[in-house]
Amino acid sequence: MQTRLNRSFAEMDAADPDAFRMLPTARIVRTDDFAKAGATANSPIRFPTLSIFCYRVDVNRTMRAPWAAVAAADGSVHLPLDIHLLLTPWDSDADAELRILGATMQILEQHPVLSGPALHPLGRWQRGEAIQILNEDLVTEDVMRTFDTLPSDFRLSVSYCLRIARIDAPDEPEHPDVTTVVRGLAASSVPYP
């Protein structure tokens, strides 16, 4: 998602030099990064930036049962997840932040699915797998509550949900039957009665 946004920001800026005050950069950030916003040139959040903050990960209740059925058939664990992101524009003035936020929402509306090369290679994605990007209704009260837990004041933000990311457990190797019993302090090869 970060790569898609950065590529699209550059395309928008090339097509219309007035699209942004300065070309923004989308960055995935951690909680600690909010305290250092704009502080130094090395800060992950420096102006202009769109921060991508994962504030919640939930098990997808709708897809859990179907993936459990797949797990029963193939003997591997599959955990379907919804990843909730808070997207926040950072710039020196409100107009520039609104431009970043508007462009972000436009891009995600035009490209609501991540698939193929847009997915991170470490995910070991299978052919045909994709992640849907959904705008999420998050009331202002919930956004404010989220910012109460962050080392930053409230900022205008939008929430998106990435659905469905799946964690697959690696296949376990075959284990030989247990043939040794430990009784007391000494090992014994005598079968346990």
Image (spheres, rainbow, N blue to C red):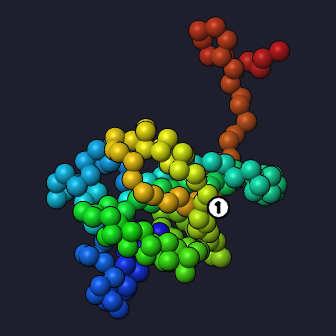
Q: Residue furthest bottom?
A: 15
Tell which of 192 and 42 is nearer to you: 42
Which residue is depicted at the point 44% across and 73% down?
102
Amino acid type for the residue under numbered disc 1: Ile
Q: Position of residue 26 (x, y in %)?
A: 36, 67
Disc 1: which residue:
164
Residue 66 lies left or right of residue 94; in this view the side is: right
Q: Secondary structure at mark 1?
A: strand
Mark yes or no: residue 183 visible: yes
Tell which of 54 and 145 is nearer to you: 145
Q: Position of residue 18 (x, y in %)?
A: 29, 85
Which residue is depicted at the point 48% across and 52% down?
54
Residue 170 lies left or right of residue 122; in this view the side is: right
* Vertical placement of residue 24 versus 32, above or below: below
Quadrant of the rendering where the C terminus is positioned:
top right
Residue 131 lies left or right of residue 144; in this view the side is: right
Which residue is depicted at the point 67% across and 11% down?
183
* Vertical placement of residue 163 versus 16, above or below: above
